[in-house]
Image (cartoon, rainbow, N blue to C red):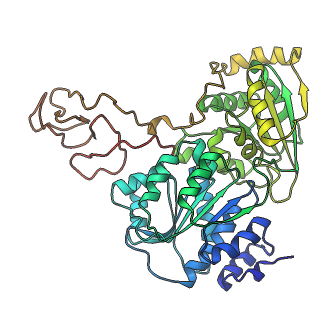
Amino acid sequence: MTQFTDLGLAKPILKALADKGYTQPTPIQAQAIPIVMKGRDLLGIAQTGTGKTAAFALPILHRLAEDRRPAPRRGFRCLVLSPTRELATQIADNFKAYAAHLGLSVATIFGGVKYGPQMRALAAGVDVVVATPGRLMDHLGEKSATLGGVEIFVLDEADQMLDLGFVVPIRKIASQLPKDRQNLFFSATMPSEIGKLAGELLKNPASVSITPQATTVERIDQSLIYIEAQRKRPLLAELLADRAVERSIVFTRTKRGADRVAKYLTAAGIEAASIHGDKTQGQRERALAAFKAGEVKALVATDIAARGIDVNDISHVFNYELPNVPEAYVHRIGRTARKGKDGVAISFCSDDERSLLKDIEKATRQKIPSFDRRNDKALAAAAAVADKLAPAEKYVDPRKADPRNNVPSELRRKRNRNGGQGKSAPGKGGQGGGQQAQGRGEGRNGGRGKGGGQAQGQGKAAAGGGGDFRGPKRGGVQQVETRWNPID
């Protein structure tokens, strides 16, 4: 049996692993670590929960420690891109734990928090930065971060990057990276678009595939319940009342749906909290902390959390609504049965979700055992009560829903396709050359200024059609290019 000591890792790293009680690498780690230590590009395919993070973190730290050099100002030697804030935090925590005896620095860059601490962390240079694409692009636009010193580039959960619409910003970030670098792609599945992106960025890569694409974890007991959409909440409450359900995650398709389900469960006497893209970072952290501490029995989440939650001993996963993207089913149920333990995954399917179920069974190459709870009189009576406790969400055809509906509303950037015809209120800013100004301050030409008017003081300004930048204000007018619709 292979041991970590057989892989040639630096002694400080082995000591950190011993402190955590790790002695044997997982299959993905045993195959990937030697390849990454040699400096080769790598394409790794493995299910969630198989140890992908350590598969790239350990050899990266080994390489950085072997060739010690200061990181450039406002730059970093290793860049790891993650699709969500929670996953970025989880990856950074693993890097810090494994680097406990190395003296290497690690920082996280993601949205939902203030820019100041991140800018100060980057100012002197950092060895490893774990970032979400949206906030990193903002820092690059503000020149508070540079990519010229990146030696190793990691794209983690590449397929979810595609689901959330991050392919364009990833390409923009990659275009600013040095050509002479090591590239590592890790993913649970490999859709054709991600395969195309990997072909563009990876140079003669080694490939490691631990399980077939979209294969679900064997230790998970999967089942499906056919149920009317309006009776899903009382059915969920009934199942959660079972003592066998110790700690569970409930996945919904929308943010509003997550809040309504959590509200109903709480009213039904079941400790529940919701987590999704419209929550502030503080709210998300508090909900996750309560879940980890066992204060909350059910964490109701959208797909933004499908790969960002690493909590031990999750006994059950409930798919309250089936995902729009079939591969997301694998990642959802992968929150249970981690580290060799057993788990249960129960999915609800209403009549309008039959096509989604068909896609899931096709992608996972399996037939999920099913039960029929339709026309259940007890659930019908409970559903009537449920509508009073928490009104049902307005129906949205899942076949027409956008899988990127987890974009936080406060971060959406609306693009004015007709170009800069912004308006100014009297005495509150001027208009000129397709610029908009909002907030407090006097336009130079005063009142309804025209032709070159600019705003001073507090406010927002956008160039050529209304990009909305929520980063640090440095005085004067901010002019930024509208690029993408960020998640984080």
**Residue appearing at x 79%, y 66% in the figure:** 27
**39 shown above or below 369:** below
Quadrant where the image shows the N terminus: bottom right
Name above or below for residue 64 compared with residue 233: below
Image quarter for residue 449?
A: top left
In which quadrant of the rendered view does residue 10 lie? bottom right
Image x and y of residue 118, in percent: 43, 60
Which is more toward the observer, 408 or 243?
Answer: 408
- The structure residue drawn at horizontal position 56% and vertical position 51%, both measured from the top left corner, is 85
Residue 112 showing in the rendered view: no
* Along the line of sight, the residue nearer the viewer: 140 or 187: 187
Report which quarter residue 91 is drawn in: bottom right
Left or right, 132 with reference to 204: left
Answer left or right for 59 relative to 22. left
Nearest to the observer: residue 378 or residue 394: 394
Residue 107 visible from this viewpoint: yes
Q: Is residue 320 left or right of residue 134?
A: right
Left or right of 465? Residue 360 is right
Reply above or below: 78 against 296: below
Expressed as whole percent of the image width and height from the top left, the position of residue 488 reads 50, 47
Residue 406 x, y percent position in the rendering: 57, 37
Residue at point 75% right, 31% down? Answer: 320
Relative vertical location of residue 11 with respect to residue 328 in this rendering, above or below: below
Residue 29 appears at what percent x and percent y?
Answer: 74, 68
Total marks placed:
0
* View extreme (left): residue: 445
